[in-house]
Amino acid sequence: MFGQSRWPRRFLAGSAAICGVDVQVEGRLADSHSLLLANHTSWLDVPVLASATGCAFVSKAELARNPVMKWLADQNRTLYIERSDRRGLHEQTAAVRNALRGDQPLALFPEGTVLGGGRLLPFRPALLTAVAPPPPGCAIQPAAIDYGAAMRSLGWAKGEHGVANAIRILGRKGRMTATVRLLEPLDPSLGRKAMAKAAHDAIAAALAPSGIAAAGL
């Protein structure tokens, strides 16, 4: 009723804390109209990044098919994308660009999947179609989510189901620190392939001290 609610960010920040994660932020958000391109290690990335920036997320449409998860995601203005629907590409592009005109940053995981925590997967240029070029006044900003020594143990192991992964992570002893590094915005004139590579390289450099190997594009 009175504009954007603060409760989704508070809820997600509280969720990160309950899961044993202390969130630190390095750098500054370029603009409230930023599109954040972040590495994807774990489901923890969502509460961690939202806690640090107040962002909404671009998510796979599969999430919207679970009524409970959809209700939770809707509270934070999640944008659902059906990646296999090429006929709807124009509408999806328009939806992303329209969301970036709002008062909340938007975040995208351009790896497109989660597979272990020991390496940075290639970024998919096709996921950046809507922002090549970005809307006027919109910053494209890489964000590195770094869990330090815990990074390798957080991703999904081969054949591990989501519930098993959640139980394993929630059963960890002690607390861990997640550092969100908000890096320099990208050149808005880059095409989607160059944009994907530039974001990948920037995040890879930020994660290198934690021993995360970068997969080649």
Image (tube, grey):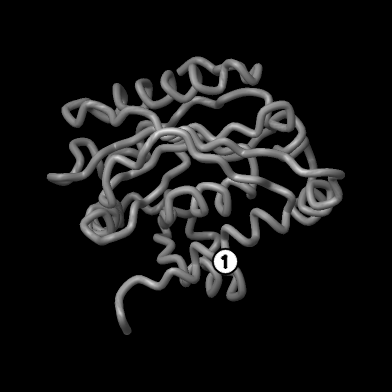
List the residue tagged with mark 1: 11
- What residue lies at 42% left-to-right and 21% top-to-bottom? 202
* Residue lying at 22% horizontally and 26% vertically, measured from the top left: 187
Q: In this view, does 127 lie above or below 58?
A: above
Where is 17 relative to 169, above or below? below
Residue drawn at point x = 27 percent, y = 28 percent? 186
Q: Is residue 113 above or below residue 206?
A: below
Say left or right for 176 vs 74.
right
Which of 25 and 131 lies nearest the eye of the viewer?
25
Question: How far from the left and from the top, in percent, is residue 10?
Answer: 53, 65
Quarter-wise, where is residue 155 in the image?
top right
**Where is residue 153 shown, x and y percent of the image?**
77, 33
In-image side of 199 versus 149 (left or right): left
Q: Is residue 184 visible?
A: yes
Check disc 1 and report its element: helix, strand or loop.
helix
Give how far across and how far down residue 150 sits, in percent. Answer: 74, 32
Q: Which amino acid does label 1 sit on?
A: Phe
Residue 185 lies in what quarter of the image? Answer: top left
Mark 1 crowd level (few <14, some 14–19, many ≥20, 10 Å Cα) = some
Q: Quadrant of the C terminus?
A: top left
Q: For this rendering, which residue is in front, 27 or 155?
A: 27
